[in-house]
Image (cartoon, rainbow, N blue to C red):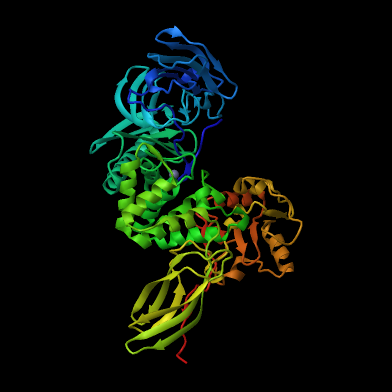
């Protein structure tokens, strides 16, 4: 199915692709009638010819599984062809002709999420017509344009479509609503057996469309949180671009953002952190992704910017920003070089290497820019980007030009480097010397780049602990190495390169504990299965069945019971137990996972397959740690191996 995906947040998907050209005429209109119990769809698409570029062949994407009842111009049938690859094309030229083009069509869809005909599904649990799927006649290459959808949903279900809900009417067994989009690109529709609750947030109507049980438990919290996010981002970036915002429940385990609504899985909604994390991320896509669109010909910048301005900002406000940056850099340290990709090549995907390239590299890019040009200039750039590019497709050049102007600086080399390059700097400070100066103290050292390739152009924060506290000194580094001289009033006690992880870089060994994620990030990870252990036990974590390891090298998972794994490790001279690595660690007898430091071996051990599967299930959201042990109340105990850190103590002056 040729629709484009951008995964975001925990699981989210963004609108993509487009439709018809802008000539000032009213945009296309779609009357859509949905019968969930029969999984049936009927569409009546209408567009003024002057709105199309009738000089070239008039053609639309439309799924080959959809039956076309009529193609007419002012009531007269028009000849057309349809292709197996999903094009409907008029066979006669319509140049210099006025009139209204109508396409009437219908389809029976899957009744559950299986993809298939019409590119969506429609059933008793809910329905979803995804953006960019060909469930209505659309022109993917066209600019964003006004669009109206009159939506009728039968069988007591409700519905939501891209844009603002401008009218609605609830009848006994049918629901009718009209949605208008001032600059739609690829429309989405969702339906479900929902209980609607609406509240006002300033000018915006916030609605939850949850099943009754979820509404009772979570509806108000979600509406309040969405209202707070909309107010906050409107203040920060410019007014929310629609008059309604809807949070709708989906039978799929998703978090998806569209113009004017978000879809969240019924299993996702009750998770306690979602209203405080992923919901804010999805709301912010109303600015980045579903109103300022990503130009599909270029990289997807929206996930990095959204992660920086939502998820990361929330962490910052909770005092957890440094920890978050450390986690991103440890994930990057666990990524094999073969999987490392430049941020500019990111198109979509929200797991593994794609997540690092799209979300973490992106968020760090914006953080490094903020450190350079300042918070005010950065926010001014985002406001300008939104003001200038709302309902248009913006590529990286558009972003760079906007921030250049707002910062009044040549940011091109900065962006080119962080968008275009894979890899990252590896920094080292040597020959550190402390001297007393006439007034205060002086610290001299050599700062080096140890990574291969051209030197990176960097502003490096050097941390300095003195008798008066901690200081940060920013140092330009554009060559392989240079001498740095820092003057301080107080006596320096210790120095470190980027101790707070403000640069996207390779961590030094002393600050980088091995983490479990390495096995999931390495496509070459092999399995050593001891006793009755089998590859199926770890497939859900890796997303594949790993091959058996044939050699004692490369990333490996060691799977078996505690005693067998301990013996295997001891025979090779590795620590056989987590408490050997971290003395004093309380290690209960149940199933566990831990990374053997320096060995590229992840041990997953437990009494039997069921116990090991339990720990593998927990790894999905906890593999950014070094170990995962049985804990209290079903919550595993997690942690990182101790590392010495990057602070260099300054010894007594020679
Ligand atoms: Zn996202």
User: Is 446 placed left or right of 439 in the picture?
Assistant: right
- Farthest left residue? 202
Q: What is the quadrant of the N terminus in the image?
A: top right
* Rendering coords of residue 36 (x, y %): 46, 21
- Seen at 48% across and 33% down, the residue is 251
Q: From the viewer's side, name the closer residue of 1 and 111.
A: 1
* Rendering coords of residue 609 (x, y %): 66, 49
- Farthest right residue? 550
Q: How many marks?
A: 0
- Seen at 41% across and 7% down, the residue is 75
* Rendering coords of residue 530 (x, y %): 73, 55
Q: From the viewer's side, name the closer residue of 397 and 321.
A: 397
- Seen at 38% across and 22% down, the residue is 51
Residue 431 sits above or below residue 12 on the image: below
Tell me which image quadrant ligand 1 sits in: top left
Residue 386 sits above or below residue 145 on the image: below
**Residue 376, picture quadrant:** bottom left
* Residue 63 in view in this figure: yes
- Farthest bottom residue? 654
User: Is 409 placed left or right of 421 in the picture?
Assistant: left
Q: From the viewer's side, name the closer residue of 196 and 548.
A: 548
* Rendering coords of residue 309 (x, y %): 37, 51
Residue 21 sits above or below residue 535 on the image: above
Residue 454 sits above or below residue 644 on the image: above
* Residue 634 in view in this figure: no
């Amino acid at each position: 199915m040729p629709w484009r995906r951008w995964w975001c947040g925990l699981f989210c998907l963004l609108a993509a692709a487009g439709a018809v050209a802008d000539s000032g005429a009213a945009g296309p209109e779609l009357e859509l009638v949905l019968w969930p119990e029969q999984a049936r769809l009927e569409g009546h698409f209408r567009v003024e010819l002057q709105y199309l570029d009738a000089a070239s062949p008039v053609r639309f994407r439309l799924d080959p599984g959809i039956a076309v009842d009529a193609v007419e111009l002012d009531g007269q049938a028009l000849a057309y062809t349809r292709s197996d690859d999903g094009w409907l094309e008029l066979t006669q030229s319509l140049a210099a002709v006025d009139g209204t083009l109508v396409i009437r069509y219908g389809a029976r869809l899957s009744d559950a999420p299986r993809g298939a005909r019409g590119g969506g599904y429609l059933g008793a649990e809910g329905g979803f017509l995804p953006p960019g799927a060909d469930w209505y006649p659309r022109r993917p290459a066209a600019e964003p344009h006004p669009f109206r959808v009159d939506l009728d949903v039968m069988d007591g279900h409700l519905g939501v479509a891209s844009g603002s809900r401008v009218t609605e009417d609830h009848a006994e067994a049918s629901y009718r609503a009209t949605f208008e989009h001032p600059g739609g690109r690829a429309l989405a529709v969702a339906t479900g057996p929902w209980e609607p609750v609406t509240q006002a947030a300033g000018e915006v109507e916030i609605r939850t469309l949850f099943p009754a049980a979820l509404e009772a438990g979570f509806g108000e919290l979600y509406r309040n949180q969405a209202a707070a996010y909309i107010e906050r981002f409107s203040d920060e970036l410019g007014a929310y671009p629609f008059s309604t915002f809807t949070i709708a429940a989906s039978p799929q385990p998703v978090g998806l953002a569209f113009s004017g609504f978000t879809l969240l899985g019924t299993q996702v909604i009750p998770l306690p952190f979602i209203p405080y994390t992923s919901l804010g991320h999805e709301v912010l896509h109303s600015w980045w992704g579903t109103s300022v669109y990503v130009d599909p010909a270029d990289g997807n910048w929206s996930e990095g910017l959204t992660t920086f301005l939502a998820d990361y900002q929330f962490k910052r406000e909770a005092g957890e920003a440094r920890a978050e940056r450390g986690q991103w850099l440890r994930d990057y340290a666990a990524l094999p070089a073969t999987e490392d990709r430049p941020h500019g090549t990111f198109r979509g995907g929200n797991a593994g290497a794609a997540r690092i390239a799209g979300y973490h590299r992106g968020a760090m890019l914006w953080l490094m820019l903020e450190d350079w040009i300042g918070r005010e200039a950065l926010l001014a750039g985002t406001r300008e980007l939104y003001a200038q590019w709302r309902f248009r497709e913006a590529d990286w050049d558009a972003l760079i030009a906007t921030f250049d102007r707002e910062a009044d600086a040549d940011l091109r080399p900065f962006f080119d480097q962080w968008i275009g390059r894979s890899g990252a700097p590896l920094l080292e400070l040597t020959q550190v010397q402390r001297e007393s100066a006439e007034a205060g103290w002086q610290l001299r050292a050599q700062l080096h780049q140890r990574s291969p390739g051209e030197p990176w152009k960097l502003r490096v924060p050097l941390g300095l602990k003195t008798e008066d506290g901690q200081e940060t000194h920013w140092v330009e580094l554009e060559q392989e190495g240079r001498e740095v001289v820092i003057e301080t009033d107080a006596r320096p006690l210790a120095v470190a390169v980027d101790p707070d992880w403000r640069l996207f870089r390779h961590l030094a060994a002393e600050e980088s504990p091995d983490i479990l994620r390495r096995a999931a990030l390495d496509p070459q990870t092999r399995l050593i299965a001891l006793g009755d252990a089998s590859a199926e036990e770890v497939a859900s974590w890796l997303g594949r069945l790993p091959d058996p390891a044939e050699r004692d090298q490369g990333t490996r998972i060691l799977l078996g019971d505690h005693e067998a794994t301990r013996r295997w490790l001891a025979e090779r001279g590795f620590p056989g137990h987590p408490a050997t690595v971290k003395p004093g660690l309380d290690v209960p007898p149940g199933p566990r996972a831990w990374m053997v430091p320096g060995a590229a071996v992840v041990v997953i051990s437990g009494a039997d397959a069921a116990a090991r599967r339990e720990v593998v299930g927990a790894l999905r959201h906890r593999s950014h740690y070094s170990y995962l042990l049985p804990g209290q109340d079903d919550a595993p105990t997690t942690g990182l191996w101790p590392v010495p850190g990057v602070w260099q103590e300054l010894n007594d002056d020679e």
